[in-house]
């Protein structure tokens, strides 16, 4: 009987496991997880911290025993993999045991990145894992923080800002980038969001590096607050510091002499790494960016699921491939929705649509008459159609909306004359 290993049990690992079984493959599958939890959705951690979701709500696929039974897999919890030896297809756990396999999937995700100048802080928080969510939740339930600095104006940073703002905390959102959502939003759209945040009382400190921070303690050694230092020499006093500076692909269990690693593990369309029978999927790996044609980490839930499914099917012996994905973000915060589709650095002819009665805003950049990216505020109902549209364009497919799509766009508030501008006429 064939033996497979899946290292890391998040979104990508789960979808790989279920695809292997859906393909009818009966291999023995060992799943290694460094936690005792079933796969969780990191996007839901801030909802749990904010008390808007019960603990169990973070686990969309059921319990470990339910998954193990339905998928006939051996899920080895609380077991950190120390090394994957790609050349001899073996997995070494931290206790020194080595197990050999026919095929191995690396699905170790990413971890929060804390730069050196913050690594000495004992009281700072991150937001990536369930443990991070629990830690922040416990802290804000024990103490009523009056002020918070959140470093990193990303999709994660804004969710943390939202939950603390709603708890009555004076929030400062800080980032080295000049604007919020620097990797997804056009500057003009960022400015609209920033105006809204400011009018709600959230302060913004953008455009300069946070060079360091030091903590204050009371006589018993409890951390009471922190001074955050900015590159221009100014300082911010805060009771709570949350660092969402970025993530790093978890690739440390591999050796760069055995497998091609750039920022993440480099994979092909089948999710194969450069080493035979070793696959990778999810935030640990670098797949094709459909728009740039280059390999890139696209750290998104749906992308991890897609890559996991493709890897699983190929491991099962059913040939499958993905030509990649585009950068896309959908996030809801503070009563607004932001959707970014495509590379926000691309410039071209700009078209803006503001719905007179449905109160949403759409900005698109056209290159050679074709949409190259979209930013939408407050209308997630059109995002799926526009994302599919952009992907069709990038695949060189005929680019017209179907009557159903056109109907939905109109129902969601877009005028026909604007829809026409988004179609490519041959
Ligand atoms: C707060 C937050 C908000 C987000 N918001 C969005 C959003 O709005 N939209 C969106 O699309 N995406 C969002 N994301 C990103 C999305 O959640 C990730 O892209 C996705 O979860 C990645 O799945 P994964 O399986 O690759 O990795 P992970 O979910 O990180 O799973 C990897 C697993 O492997 C385990 N592991 C790692 N190393 C080892 C080892 N050596 N041995 C054993 N086990 C190991 C880890 O503990 C983890 O359980 C958000 C992420 C966060 C943190």
Image: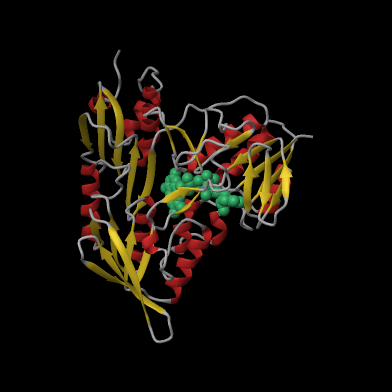
Q: Residue furthest right?
A: 1
The answer to whether any part of residue 355 appears in the image is: yes
Q: Residue at x 38, y 37 (%)?
A: 327
**Location of residue 100 in the rendering, given as x and y in whole percent from the top left corner:** 73, 41
User: Residue drawn 48% across and 62% down?
Assistant: 133
x, y percentage for residue 254?
57, 44
Query: How many numbered marks appear?
Result: 0
Q: Dividing the image into 4 quarters, which one contains the N terminus?
A: top right
Vertically, is 3 above or below 292? below
Above or below, 234 relative to 341: below
Residue 144: name its quadrant. Answer: bottom left
Nearer to us in this view, 364 or 26:
26
Residue at 23%, 31% (x, y): give it: 347
How far from the left and from the top, in percent, is residue 55? 55, 61
Does 283 appear above or below 392? Answer: below
For the C terminus, give its image quadrant.
Answer: top left
Q: Is residue 242 left or right of residue 277?
A: left
Which one is in front, 405 or 124? 124
From the viewer's perspective, is residue 32 above or below residue 322? below
Q: Nearer the viewer, residue 275 or 302?
A: 275
Where residue 308 sits, quadrant-wise, is top right
Q: Where residue 228 appears, x then y in whole percent? A: 29, 67
- Residue lying farthest top? 426
State the residue in front, 295 or 47. 295
């Amino acid at each position: 009987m064939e033996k497979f290993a899946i290292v890391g049990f998040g979104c990508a690992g789960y979808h790989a496991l279920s695809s292997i079984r859906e393909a009818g493959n009966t291999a023995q599958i060992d799943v290694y997880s460094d936690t005792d939890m079933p796969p969780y959705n990191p996007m839901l951690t801030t909802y749990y911290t904010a008390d808007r979701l019960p603990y169990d709500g973070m686990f969309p696929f059921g319990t470990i025993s339910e998954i193990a039974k339905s998928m006939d897999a051996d899920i080895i919890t609380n077991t950190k993999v120390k090394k994957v030896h790609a050349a001899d297809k073996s997995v070494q756990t931290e206790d020194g045991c080595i197990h050999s396999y026919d095929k191995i999937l690396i699905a170790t995700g990413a971890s929060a990145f804390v730069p050196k100048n913050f690594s000495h802080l004992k009281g700072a928080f991150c937001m990536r894992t369930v443990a991070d969510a629990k830690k922040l939740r416990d802290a804000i339930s024990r103490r009523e923080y009056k002020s918070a600095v959140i470093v990193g104006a990303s999709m994660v940073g804004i969710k943390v800002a939202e939950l603390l703002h709603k708890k009555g905390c004076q929030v400062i959102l800080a980032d080295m980038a000049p604007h919020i959502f620097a990797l997804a939003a056009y500057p003009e759209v960022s400015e609209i969001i920033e105006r809204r945040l400011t009018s709600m009382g959230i302060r913004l400190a953008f455009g300069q590096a946070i060079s360091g921070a030091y903590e204050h303690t009371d006589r018993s050694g409890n951390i009471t607050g922190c001074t955050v230092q900015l590159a221009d020499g100014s300082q911010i006093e805060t009771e709570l510091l949350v660092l969402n500076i970025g993530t790093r692909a978890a690739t440390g269990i591999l050796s760069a002499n055995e497998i091609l690693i750039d920022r993440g593990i480099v994979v092909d369309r089948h999710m194969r790494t450069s080493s035979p029978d070793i696959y990778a999927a999810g935030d640990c790996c670098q797949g094709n960016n459909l728009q740039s044609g280059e390999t890139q980490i696209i750290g998104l839930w749906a992308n991890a699921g897609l890559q996991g499914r493709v890897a699983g099917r190929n491991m099962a012996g059913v040939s499958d491939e993905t030509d990649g994905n585009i950068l896309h973000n959908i996030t809801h915060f503070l009563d607004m929705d932001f959707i970014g589709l495509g590379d926000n650095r691309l410039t071209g002819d700009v078209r803006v649509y503001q719905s007179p009665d449905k109160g949403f805003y759409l900005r698109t950049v056209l290159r050679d008459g074709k949409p190259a990216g979209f930013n939408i505020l407050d209308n997630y109902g059109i995002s799926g159609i526009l994302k599919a549209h952009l992907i069709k364009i990038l695949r060189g497919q005929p680019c017209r909306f179907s009557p159903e799509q056109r109907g939905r766009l109109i129902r969601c508030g877009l005028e026909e004359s604007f829809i026409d501008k988004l179609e490519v006429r041959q």
